[in-house]
């Protein structure tokens, strides 16, 4: 629950902030309005599997077109976490 709240807070901050550069936001899931940075943040907060991302962000619950891209971001971010 804490992870889901942290992700929601991060997503709300991204969507309501007027100081971000809109060109840097990449929407991965158009159905849910989920950005690449929200996925990466969820992984940094402990979401290590697609199931975790599905629970905290709601990915792949509608059309599923985002699943492959999100899996790639998940794998990249997990690898980066291990290297640090």
Image (tube, grey):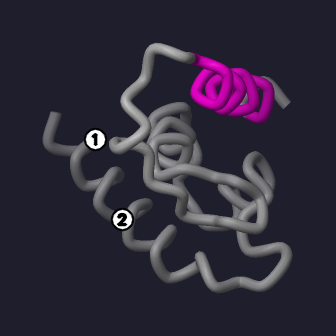
Residue 31, compared with residue 68, is above or below; it is above
- The residue that label 2 is drawn on is 75
As drawn, is 20 to the left or to the right of 83? right
- At horizontal 22% and vertical 47% (from top left) the residue drawn is 80
Residue 15 location, x and y as percent?
Answer: 65, 31
Residue 30, compared with residue 9, is above or below; it is below
Quarter of the picture containing the N terminus is top right
Count residues near mark 2 (Cα–Cα under 10 Å), then give few for <14, some for 14-19, many for 20+.
Answer: some
State the extent of the magenta-drawn residues as a range.
4-17
Taking depth in this image into account, of 26 and 74 the one nearest to the observer is 26
As drawn, is 5 to the left or to the right of 41? right
Mark 1, secondary structure of its residue: helix
- At horizontal 54% and vertical 63% (from top left) the residue drawn is 28
- The residue that label 1 is drawn on is 81
Residue 77 location, x and y as percent?
Answer: 33, 51
Can you name the residue that lies furthest to the left here?
83
- At horizontal 52% and vertical 53% (from top left) the residue drawn is 48
Taking depth in this image into account, of 66 and 30 the one nearest to the observer is 30
Characterize the magenta stretch by its predominant secondary structure.
helix
Count residues near mark 1 (Cα–Cα under 10 Å), then give few for <14, some for 14-19, many for 20+.
Answer: few
């Amino acid at each position: 629950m804490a992870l889901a709240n942290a992700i929601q807070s991060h997503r709300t901050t991204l969507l309501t902030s007027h100081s971000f550069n809109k060109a840097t936001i990449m929407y991965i899931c158009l159905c849910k309005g989920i950005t690449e940075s929200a996925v990466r943040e969820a992984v940094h907060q402990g979401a290590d599997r697609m199931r975790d991302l599905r629970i905290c962000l709601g990915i792949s619950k509608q059309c599923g077109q985002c699943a492959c891209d999100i899996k790639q971001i998940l794998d990249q971010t997990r690898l980066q976490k291990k290297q640090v």
